[in-house]
């Protein structure tokens, strides 16, 4: 192509720019060769005439097509030059925020200065096993490439991470090591990978510091070798360090810090464990305060120290050594603060007396204070004849002190590295290793010294190795493709390296000058000028005689020679070192011993290891210099790197401000030139950088072919003909075996031809379409114009009318507003005046009142104080009593409050309250009538008595008149009687008045009470009617809220699934632990044999199962499958609602549980007493009687006191009842209840008295019978004895004494029984009182509830009433459940006792029968047991104990699924259950336990042996679940017997409850299910990406990636022919095989659906993760292809009746991702549509796909940055996870629903091919 064709109109170019380095422009006029000006237009439409010339100013660089911009490999660009590379990196970094980009074999990593979520374990798993070019560039891709090549080629690898300070080298190396630790984790328990990662915080603490460019800059280089064994698992590691920056210990520039460990110790100085370090703030120490900024934003030094200590502990460094390390580091800080003062002569110095820091320094290091004080200011000179001590000046002493500090820190650094290597060292043989080199990049500052010289020297060596490696790879690629190879000229920096390290080079001259006694930096610089002035890489500055310039590969660097000699010598005085060697601390002494005396460890640093023993001169003049050591270690490093396969990571610092995602082009270009990226580009551009495979080239550029040329079947021939036609110069391309190689710019030329072809076609299409559109548009516009005119005229008229109305309204509004404004102002002023007057008057009045109150209060204080002094003693005693009473009453009140709250929720109580109120009103009315009648009756009686007395008085008067003159005595007597009658009459009248007054008051009170009750009753009725009305309204609203209930059910179901998932994860962990235990057990059995007793397998397995499930309580947890069956019977909706209510009220139920217990205290006491009496009557053992007697003795005094109190309360209660009964009417309801209570108490007392009499009679009979027996025995003895007792009085006395003691014992017994009865009656009485109080409290609570509901809104009132009713029903339900559970527990306990008794009886009968049989017919004992069973036991199998091992071997260990394929599914499970039935029938618990335990362990062993066999795992999952279902179906529980036949119910287990073993089998089923999923995922995972993303299911839509070379040749396994490719049909076929296998094995359909759902989740997760990490599949055509593939998967689900399994829902994320690739992505409406469409994708995933979206041609636009930003800023109503990728290891909770079998066990046929002839059918 000619220049005229390339630099034509509309061609875009790059021109230099002083600010942005390069700037884009476009040619506006065709350029003709020879013209001096190129006419351009900048991006802001500014015209520019760019001068060109053949020598001074060549033509500008051409820009790549937009379709190539953003490529993940820079070598894929058509034009390879500096502006293209810089622009591509900038676009990738700023727009999609991609920080990684390939440049051939180099990974360019740009520091984002922001934490990105792209380093999780899911990302590691996604990159593991992938080829390097298949996924987006990543540090994990480089690590995987190194790991794969190490395993495939069996060659050591190296990852070289370089870059300047702050570019992210340390982080990149850390992530690479994390990848190796995750992928190649150690198989043993040593956790080497954790130790390797733990070394990072230690090295960062002691080797990293804050600089002006980086807050965590590594000030040393390190090379970490990670060792692997033959299985490529990490077994150890080794670290080598290079050139620690020791000068930073004693000097830091402004805004820099010393090493982190100093600040960490200072930040933790206040902690107790660091008190002995005598540290304070870092500002107080010279070595840490030079930078004037001791803090780093966002860094907690104290927390970092804890992490450092944890890392030390993990690496095995003991606490004592850690403490010693911290002491050494702290001593360096104190050493820097030692003040050295000058003497008067100026040539000597001294240390201040009592220098605290010197004392701390010597104490921490354990050295002599006086010696150190002396040698800090003096030095020893040794001559040939004598040795003398010389004084040092202040400057010399300070330099010596600083040199000592640097030396101590360097030795401490080496010691820590050495011990880290010891911790990482392994004794096993290392097969291969991967080295990670984290080393400084090329550095150039304003002042460059010895450190920068060494760093740049190392980079020169690395760049030379890098250039040769790149050249070698290019040569191998061309030779493999068999294309002509021409030598590529590349930059060789060997002359620059020779200038530094050759004979008489810079380093040699530096070492020579160091040997000169009075050598100086100036003399050394002059020698350099003289020796190397003729070298092309050495220059002398014009304005300086002490500096020199070296022309490095990256740039020219000027070095200042000042300080070179001192840093190269690294001189430390031997006297100070000798003092430290004599330290009393062993670690300090070991630090400074010469390494000539001890053999160097393997892990010591290379740069400090001497090559040979040196003479121990006191001044150490002949030791190796720093430059010599660095050169030796660098040569060793290069030998290591040359012996390995290198992988390069170049870290770029985008800006100096540390701002996230800000790109400074000038800084980036400097680093690209320095790190060798542009050199790689230049080498690639010199050959054939663009490479296309033949199929990709044909698919891309077939539009340039004619129809006749496309008919050929040979694609290679077609491509050859096309290229020869289009490109005339045949040197511009070459044809390889599999690829076409192009020179730089040829792909862009082909793209231009393709675009021209498309443009001409588009012009023709646009011409026709635009004409048609314009005609249609004209018709529409004309019709619309007429309509607009009509509507416009009407609109103008209406608007004028509105204007007139608004004008009039505005005038009215203005008038009203002005009036209101003025009136408000007047009122405001008036209120202010009134307020001021009121406050003023109040202020004066209050002053007068305060003066008066002062005098008054003084008098009151005097009075109160005098009284207080007298009442204080009394008040103290009373307050103490009141406090105790209050506390006690508060406790009781809280209990009563809890009780009342429980009873207040009953709705029935409200109804009874209303009915009771009406009855009480009627009773009160009757009582008033009766009292009025009684009053009238008493009045009538009083009148009768008065009349009678009047008559008697008249009779007396008449008798007195008749008598006339009777004696005075009779008159006086009559007079007395008359007075007495008058007094009685007065008393009767007074009593009458008093009674009338009392009755009147009581009548008034009753009338008021009746009125109040009537009002309250009316109010309650109205509230009741209102409540009923609200309840009806709520029922209607409750039906309308069904959608919210469904949402609640969904959330609860999700919580239930999460709980199940946690449970399954625990089981998975338990499986892992069991497997590790089995592995260790097998290794132990293979390693050695231990004689002695061993447990048999059955017992051992039972113990294992017991130990695994001891924490599971069946009474608490229940049977999982039982609950599942209950859910199925109730229905999903009801069950979900019950579960939801229970979850919400769980906390409330716990509180109500305590209240319920308090309410049932009395009942529990009565039951406890009844049980104790029953146990006393039933138990016949001496222990129980002793316990009961002890209990009665201990409680006797307490019961007596309680009995007295109860008697007193009973009497008071009787007295109050009698008083109320005398006052109230008998029909009163309260009196009836008390009468009933009294009758119960009387009957109880009568019964108590009767029992007392019975007990006395029985006790008397027992005592008399005992005496009779005792008397009969001596009588018999006396009749037989030769002598007979004649004295009978002692016998009678003894009998009387015994009778007395018996009566005392009976009295005690009766007293105990009486106390028990009294306590019982007291409890009953208290319970009745409590019930009455609770009823009253219930009424009050109901009234409170009614008042509360009346204050609520109608909706809230209905909701509250429903909530109360739900609470009541829930409490009742919980009480019933508790009662049922208690009854079930009692039933199980009784059944267990019954089984034990039956077993004992059967054993006794069997022993007796065996004894009789042995005596009669011993050979027929076996026949007797067989005859006993006969035909009653059908569906059972019997086997002998010795055949048990053969049974498991035949039925479990050796069986294959194909041997029972033609029989009943799950045949082994049925056979095992029939054996269990027989063992249950014969009541052999050991046999049942052995059978079940051995079965479980045998299944585990088979699955462990076949852990990769899907068929075997599916087979045993089906059999395990079937055995579990059989144990449930025949358990005898009614919940599992609903679908059984009559015969199946007869076959239920009789003697044993195997609920615990059902739980064990359920857990085993879950473990097998998880193993099945793991095996299936391992089979389909390699197929997913190829089938879902890469296979061309729709060939016409096959997308083509624009770059022809994506996979690197080193990533491909050439011997195996590359990775296997799978189609979608192959994936569906594999899923069909899984489904068919599970159906053939008889696996439950529900479990099959769950397996398919889990596999579809794996397909979705792997597909989406690869889509998010691959740019080549994010296009419109791939979206269409992906949507077609997912539809095929859904069709397969429908064809196999798996739509109900929810598997299709798991594909929703990739379906939405496919739709996202296809939808329009331009406007804000499109953004809203995308957010609503992609509900299953997180915002992070949506943005990632949009960033990766790649157009296939230039007519398809990229997604704009503004559109992506709008997606990010749009509020999302979702909870997005923080990670980008999906969890491929996520497991859905598994559910095993109960599925009974319709098979009858007696009809089961066992094929003879199984070899189970030893089983006997019974």
Image: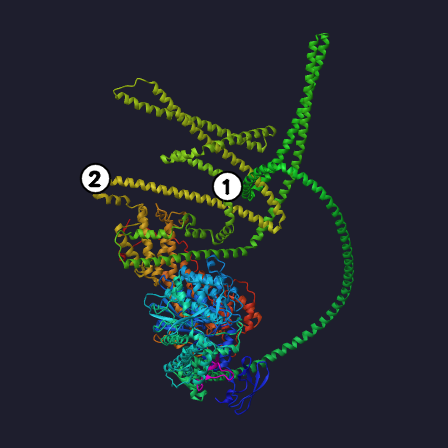
Q: Which residues are magenta?
A: 532-559
Q: CA distance from mark 2 to mark 1?
A: 65 Å
Q: Is residue 1184 visible?
A: yes
Closest to the observer, 465 or 816? 465
Please report whichever mark, 2 or 1, sits nearer to the chain's N-terminal start: 1
Disc marking residue 311: none
Q: Position of residue 920 (x, y in %)?
A: 61, 35
Mark whose residue sits in front, 2 or 1: 1
Closest to the observer, 28 or 1519? 28
Q: Is residue 1602 visible?
A: no
Tag count: 2
**Residue of label 1:** 1158
Magenta segment includes 1107: no
Q: Which residue shows up at 60% across the image and 51% down it?
A: 1356
Apparent side of residue 106 relative to residue 781 in the rendered image (left or right): left
Relative to 580, residue 50 above or below: below
């Amino acid at each position: 192509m000619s220049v005229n064709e390339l630099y034509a109109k509309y061609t875009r170019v790059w021109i230099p720019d002083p600010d942005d380095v390069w700037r884009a422009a476009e040619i506006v006029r065709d350029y003709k060769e020879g013209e001096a000006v190129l006419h351009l237009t900048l991006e802001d439409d500014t015209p520019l005439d760019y001068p060109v010339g053949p020598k001074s100013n060549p033509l500008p660089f051409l820009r790549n097509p937009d379709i190539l911009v953003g490529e993940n490999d820079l070598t894929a660009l058509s034009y390879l030059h500096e502006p293209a590379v810089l622009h591509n990196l900038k676009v990738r970094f700023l727009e999609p925020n991609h920080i990684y980009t390939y440049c051939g074999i180099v990974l360019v990593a740009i520091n984002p200065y922001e934490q990105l979520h792209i380093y999780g374990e899911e990302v590691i798993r996604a990159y593991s096993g992938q080829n390097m070019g298949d996924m987006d560039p990543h540090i994990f891709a480089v690590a995987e490439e190194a790991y794969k090549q190490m395993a495939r080629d069996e060659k050591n690898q190296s990852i070289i991470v370089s870059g300047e300070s702050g570019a992210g080298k340390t982080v990149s190396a850390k992530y690479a090591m994390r990848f190796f630790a995750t992928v190649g984790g150690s198989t043993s328990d040593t956790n080497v990978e954790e130790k390797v990662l733990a070394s990072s915080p230690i090295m960062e603490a002691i080797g990293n510091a804050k600089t002006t460019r980086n807050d965590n800059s590594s000030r040393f280089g390190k090379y970490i070798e990670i060792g692997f064994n033959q299985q490529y698992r990490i077994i150890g590691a080794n670290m080598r360090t290079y050139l620690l920056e020791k000068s930073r210990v004693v000097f830091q520039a402004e805004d820099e810090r010393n090493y982190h460990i100093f600040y960490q110790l200072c930040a933790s100085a206040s902690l107790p464990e660091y008190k002995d370090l005598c540290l304070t703030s870092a500002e107080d120490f010279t070595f840490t305060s030079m930078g004037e900024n001791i803090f780093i934003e966002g860094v907690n030094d104290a927390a970092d120290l804890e992490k450092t200590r944890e890392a030390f502990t993990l690496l095995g460094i003991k606490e004592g050594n850690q403490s010693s390390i911290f002491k050494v580091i702290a001593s360096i800080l104190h050493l820097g603060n030692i003040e050295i003062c000058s003497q008067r002569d100026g040539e000597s110095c001294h240390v201040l007396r009592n220098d605290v820091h010197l004392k701390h320094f010597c104490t921490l290091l354990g050295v002599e204070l006086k010696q150190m004080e002396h040698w800090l200011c003096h030095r020893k000179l040794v001559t040939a004849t004598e040795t003398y001590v010389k004084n040092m000046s202040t400057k010399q002493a300070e330099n010596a002190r600083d040199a000592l500090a640097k030396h101590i820190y360097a030795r401490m650094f080496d010691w820590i590295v050495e011990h880290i290597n010891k911790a990482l060292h392994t004794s096993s043989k290392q097969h291969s290793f991967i080295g990670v080199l984290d080393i400084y990049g090329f550095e150039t500052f304003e002042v460059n010294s010895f450190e920068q010289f060494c760093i740049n020297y190392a980079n020169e060596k690395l760049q030379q190795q890098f250039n040769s490696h790149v050249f070698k790879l290019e040569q191998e690629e061309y030779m493999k493709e068999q294309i002509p190879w021409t030598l590529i000229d590349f930059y060789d920096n060997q002359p620059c390296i020779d200038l530094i390290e050759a004979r008489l080079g810079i380093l040699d001259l530096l070492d020579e000058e160091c040997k000169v006694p009075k050598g100086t930096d100036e003399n050394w610089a002059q020698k350099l000028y003289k020796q190397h002035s003729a070298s092309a890489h050495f220059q002398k500055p014009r304005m300086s005689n002490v500096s020199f310039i070296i022309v490095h590969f990256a740039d020219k660097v000027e070095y200042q020679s000042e300080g070179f000699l001192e840093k190269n010598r690294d001189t430390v005085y031997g006297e100070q070192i000798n003092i430290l060697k004599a330290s009393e601390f062993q670690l300090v002494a070991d630090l400074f011993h010469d390494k000539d005396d001890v053999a160097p460890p393997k892990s010591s640093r290379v740069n400090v290891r001497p090559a040979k023993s040196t003479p121990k001169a006191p001044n150490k003049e002949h030791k190796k210099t720093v430059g010599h050591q660095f050169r030796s270690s660098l040569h060793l490093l290069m030998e290591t790197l040359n012996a390995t396969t290198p992988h390069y990571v170049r870290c770029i610092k985008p800006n100096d401000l540390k701002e996230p995602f800000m790109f400074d082009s000038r800084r980036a270009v400097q680093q690209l030139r320095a790190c060798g990226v542009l050199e790689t580009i230049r080498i690639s551009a010199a050959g054939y950088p663009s490479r296309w495979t033949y199929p990709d080239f044909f698919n891309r550029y077939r539009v340039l072919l004619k129809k006749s040329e496309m008919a050929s079947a040979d694609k290679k021939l077609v491509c050859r003909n096309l290229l020869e036609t289009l490109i005339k110069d045949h040197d511009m391309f070459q044809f390889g075996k599999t690829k076409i190689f192009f020179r730089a710019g040829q792909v862009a030329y082909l793209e231009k031809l393709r675009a021209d072809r498309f443009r001409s076609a588009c012009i023709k299409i646009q011409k026709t379409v635009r004409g048609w559109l314009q005609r249609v548009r004209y018709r529409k516009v004309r019709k619309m114009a007429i309509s607009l005119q009509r509507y416009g005229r009407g609109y103008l008229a209406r608007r004028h009318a509105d204007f007139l109305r608004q004008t009039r309204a505005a005038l009215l509004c203005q008038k009203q507003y002005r009036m209101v404004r003025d009136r408000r102002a007047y009122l405001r002023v008036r209120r202010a005046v009134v307020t001021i007057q009121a406050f003023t008057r109040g202020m004066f009045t209050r002053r007068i009142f305060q003066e008066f109150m002062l005098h008054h209060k003084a008098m009151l204080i005097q009075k109160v104080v005098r009284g207080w002094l007298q009442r204080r003693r009394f008040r103290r005693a009373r307050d103490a009593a009141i406090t105790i009473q209050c506390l006690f009453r508060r406790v009781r009140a809280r209990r009563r409050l809890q009780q009342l709250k429980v009873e207040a929720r009953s709705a029935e109580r409200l109804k009874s309250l209303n009915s009771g109120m009406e009855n009480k009103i009627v009773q009160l009315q009757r009582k008033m009538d009766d009292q009025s009648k009684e009053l009238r009756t008493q009045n009538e009686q009083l009148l009768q008595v008065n009349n009678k007395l009047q008559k008697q008085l008249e009779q007396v008067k008449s008798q007195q008149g008749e008598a006339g003159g009777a004696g005075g005595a009779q008159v006086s007597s009559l007079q007395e009687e008359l007075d007495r009658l008058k007094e009685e009459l007065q008393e009767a009248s007074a009593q009458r008045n008093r009674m009338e007054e009392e009755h009147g008051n009581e009548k008034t009170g009753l009338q008021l009470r009746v009125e109040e009750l009537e009002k309250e009753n009316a109010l309650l009725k109205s509230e009741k009617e209102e409540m009923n009305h609200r309840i009806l309204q709520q029922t209607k609203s409750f039906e309308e809220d069904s959608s919210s209930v469904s949402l609640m059910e969904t959330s609860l179901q999700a919580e239930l699934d999460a709980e199940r998932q946690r449970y399954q994860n625990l089981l998975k962990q338990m499986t892992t632990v069991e497997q590790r235990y089995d592995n260790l057990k097998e290794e132990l059995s293979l390693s050695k044999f231990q004689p002695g007793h061993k447990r048999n397998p059955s017992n051992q397995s039972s113990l294992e199962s017991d130990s695994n499930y001891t924490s599971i309580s069946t009474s608490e947890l229940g049977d999982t499958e039982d609950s599942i069956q209950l859910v199925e019977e109730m229905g999903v909706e009801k069950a979900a609602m019950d579960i939801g209510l229970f979850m919400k009220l769980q906390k409330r139920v716990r509180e109500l549980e305590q209240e319920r217990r308090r309410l049932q205290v009395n009942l529990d006491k009565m039951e406890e007493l009844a049980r104790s009496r029953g146990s006393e009557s039933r138990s016949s053992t001496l222990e129980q009687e002793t316990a009961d007697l002890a209990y009665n003795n201990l409680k006797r005094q307490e019961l007596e006191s309680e009995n007295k109190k109860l008697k007193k309360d009973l009497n008071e209660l009787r007295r109050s009842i009698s008083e109320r009964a005398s006052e109230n009417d008998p029909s009163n309801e309260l009196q009836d209840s008390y009468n009933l209570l009294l009758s119960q108490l009387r009957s109880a007392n009568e019964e108590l008295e009767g029992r007392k009499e019975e007990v006395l009679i029985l006790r008397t009979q027992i005592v008399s019978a005992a005496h009779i027996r005792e008397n009969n025995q001596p009588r018999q003895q006396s009749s037989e004895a030769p002598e007979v007792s004649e004295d009978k009085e002692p016998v009678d006395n003894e009998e009387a004494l015994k009778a007395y003691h018996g009566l005392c014992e009976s009295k005690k017994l009766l007293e105990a029984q009486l106390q028990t009865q009294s306590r019982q009656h007291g409890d009953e009485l208290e319970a009745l009182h409590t019930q009455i109080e609770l009823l009253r409290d219930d009424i009050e609570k109901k009234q409170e509830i009614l008042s509360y509901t009346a204050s609520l809104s109608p909706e809230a009132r209905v909701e509250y009433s429903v909530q109360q009713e739900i609470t009541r029903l829930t409490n009742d339900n919980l009480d019933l459940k508790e009662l049922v559970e208690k009854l079930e527990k009692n039933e199980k306990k009784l059944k267990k006792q019954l089984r034990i008794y039956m077993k004992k009886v059967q054993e006794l009968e069997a022993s007796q029968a065996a004894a009789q049989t042995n005596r009669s017919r011993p050979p027929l004992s076996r026949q007797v047991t067989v005859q006993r069973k006969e035909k009653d036991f059908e569906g059972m199998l019997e086997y002998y104990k010795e055949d048990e091992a053969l049974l498991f071997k035949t039925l479990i260990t050796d069986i294959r699924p194909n041997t029972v394929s033609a029989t009943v599914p799950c045949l082994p499970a049925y056979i095992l259950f029939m054996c269990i039935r027989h063992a249950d029938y014969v009541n052999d618990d050991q046999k049942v336990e052995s059978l079940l335990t051995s079965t479980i362990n045998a299944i585990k062993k088979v699955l462990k042996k076949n852990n990769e066999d899907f068929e075997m795992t599916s087979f045993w999952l089906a059999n395990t679940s079937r055995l579990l279902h059989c144990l449930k179906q025949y358990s005898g529980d009614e919940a599992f017997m609903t679908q059984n036949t009559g015969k199946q119910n007869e076959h239920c287990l009789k003697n044993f409850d195997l609920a615990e073993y059902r739980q064990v089998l359920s857990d085993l089923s879950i473990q097998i299910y998880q193993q099945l999923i793991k095996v299936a995922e391992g089979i389909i995972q390699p197929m997913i990406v190829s089938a879902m993303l890469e296979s061309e299911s729709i060939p016409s839509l096959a997308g083509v990636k624009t770059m022809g070379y994506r996979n690197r040749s080193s990533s491909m396994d050439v011997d195996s022919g590359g990775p296997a490719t799978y189609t979608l049909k192959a994936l569906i076929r594999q899923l069909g095989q899984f489904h068919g296998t599970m159906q053939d094995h008889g696996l439950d359909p529900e479990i099959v659906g769950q397996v398919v759902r889990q596999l579809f989740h794996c397909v979705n997760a792997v597909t989406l993760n690869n889509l998010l990490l691959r740019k080549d599949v994010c296009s419109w055509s791939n979206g269409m292809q992906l949507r077609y593939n997912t539809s095929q998967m859904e069709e397969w689900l429908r064809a196999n009746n798996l739509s109900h399994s929810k598997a299709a829902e798991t594909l929703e994320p990739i379906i939405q991702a496919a739709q996202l690739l296809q939808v329009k992505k331009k406007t804000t409406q499109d953004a809203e549509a995308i957010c609503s469409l992609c509900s299953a994708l997180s915002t992070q995933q949506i943005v990632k796909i949009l960033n990766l979206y790649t157009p296939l041609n230039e007519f398809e636009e990229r997604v704009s940055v503004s559109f992506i930003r709008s997606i990010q800023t749009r509020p999302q109503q979702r909870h997005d996870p923080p990670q980008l990728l999906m969890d491929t290891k996520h497991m859905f909770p598994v559910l095993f629903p109960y599925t009974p079998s319709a098979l009858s066990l007696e009809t089961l046929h066992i094929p003879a091919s199984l070899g189970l002839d030893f089983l006997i059918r019974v």
